[in-house]
Amino acid sequence: MFNKETLFGDIFGGLTAAVVALPLALAFGVQSGMGAIAGLYGAIALGILAAIFGGTKTQISGPTGPMVVVSAAVIAGEIAIYGSLEAAFGTIIATFVLAGIFQILMGVSGIGKYIRYMPYPVVSGFMSGIGLIIIALQIFPFFGLKSPSDVVEILTSLGNIVGHVNTQAALLALATIAIIYLFPRVTKKVPSALVALVGLTIISVLFEMNVPIIGDIPKGFPDIHIDTLLAMDWHHPMNMVVPALTLAALASIDSLLTSVVADNKTKTKHNSNKELIGQGFGNVVAGLIGGLPGAGATVRTVVNIDSGGRTQLSGIIHGVTLLIILLGAGAYAKLIPIPVLAGILITVGIGIVDYKGLKHIMHVPKSEALIMVIVLILTTFVDLLQAVAVGMVMASILFMKSMSDIAENKASAILIEEETGEVMNLKEKDGDRSQQVYVQSFYGPIFFGFASHFTELITKLPKVNIVVFRLEEVPYIDQSGMYAIEDAVLALEKRGIEVYFVGMPKQVEDMLRNIKLIPDLVNESELFSDFQEFKISLNKEYSIQK
């Protein structure tokens, strides 16, 4: 972990990442409903522990936009049940701890490698929806007002803003956005969000502006709330399981996508399962100290790498720096205006929206565009987990249809003369009966999406004596495909037709042997490694006249 060659870069990268993380952690804490300190606690615990135990050397972890949206929904839901944050606190942190445990289990079970199968339209629609939620939740704080917690309620309540605008708050929020976008033109060495946070807080204090502020922040090290967990009501644990699974899945996706970005920039290779274990451990501890759960943060990770960070030490320094700030700057942090944090979060939301996906929406297949739009709408107005679930189901069905279409279009049944290009007249050597041979070729997987068409192909075969199944181009078969083959062989043999298999791949053969379809129904003598071997066998049994 400690490398003299990268030590200076790790120190500078970690310090720079901490400076970028500070305003975001405070803003995310406020947006969550648990207060700024919860964001800072989460950034410290996750930042240090995920760096130590994770599988991506340059990853900077902490509360992120997608995670805070889900966390805020969990917190709001529990407060609605229990009546106050204090009463719901035990259930909230138990959910966060459980999410971390689920992440650890995902890492231990090796599920991390499957995250890469998330279709782009689902990710795009989800991220854009998250961005819109973050922006919507800051509309009221932008004007110095308390915001409803639901996007639909926000949109239906916009008329209430008129006549209640806090002009000073709106000016601070506008100034924040302007600084964040314009200050990098002056210099990129100092994070513009930090400039806005510190500079506008000072202005707010000097001019005694009448705007809402963060308020008191607890001093010293955070408490460990094990007693709270032990004393809480565990009679309805399932109420925590679904939100915890949602947080765990989202944190895993968010972290591993950031790991891929880090790999691309550093030309390294992360360990997905180890990363999930590290992130899970960090989220468990974050929950125990009353902090927000989080994930690998793309912007902070990129800042760390660009500033020289190359090992886990940079992530540890980032977390320790935030801890030092917590211990020494709490008295000043309480003066930060809420509109400034709103301005910061609006720029975060704008940055999360997937503009590339939206720009190309008219140029991608209509089915993929539809998935992206549906996921975006469901994410924004319904539920994040349902949005991803619906998107994955739609994407899977459309993918299976595409694979089935390819297999159906390529599958062909032709006479052996057409297959070989030779005029072949087969007669039994010990008789005068002529034989007709049909070759049924398959391309692509034989799975449940193709099984019904497979059966249809067999029923449409003309009156022949021999059918050859060519399977060289079949990479995979599932249970439905196996039973389709079994039904086909039984149906053909019932019609007095001999069936042979040519070029059966190992996966297909293993599946058929596992259920004893070979040799109970398909004899070893009916299997041939290639078509030439089958033709040689025909020569032994039949007189082939060309």
Image: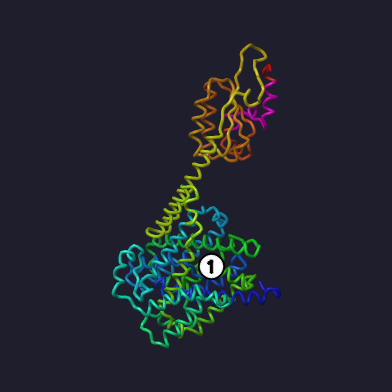
Magenta-span inclusion, residue 529: yes
Read off the magenta span: 518-539
- Place residue 317 in its image quadrant: bottom right
Horizontal side, residue 164 vs residue 54: left or right: left
Nearer-the-camera pick, 213 or 434 = 213
Q: Residues within 10 Å of mark 1 (few under 14, many from 20)?
A: many
Q: Quadrant of the C terminus?
A: top right
- Place residue 128 in its image quadrant: bottom left
Horizontal side, residue 457 vs residue 154: left or right: right
**Residue 441: x percent and y percent?**
59, 31
Nearer-the-camera pick, 442 or 74 = 442
Q: Residue furthest top?
A: 432
Majority secondary structure in the magenta region = helix
Q: For numbered disc 1, what is the local secondary structure?
A: loop
The amino acid sitting under disc 1 is Ala
**Residue 400: x percent and y percent?**
50, 43
Residue drawn at x 65%, y 15% is 428
**Is residue 290 at least partly visible in the picture?**
no
Magenta-span inclusion, residue 505: no
Q: Quadrant of the N terminus?
A: bottom right
* Above-or-below relation of 221 to 512: below
**Residue 421: x percent and y percent?**
66, 25
* Above-or-below relation of 497 to 258: above
Horizontal side, residue 162 vs residue 65: left or right: left
- Place residue 342 in its image quadrant: bottom left
**Residue 500: x percent and y percent?**
61, 27
Q: Residue furthest bottom?
A: 206
Please name the residue that numbered disc 1 is placed on: 297
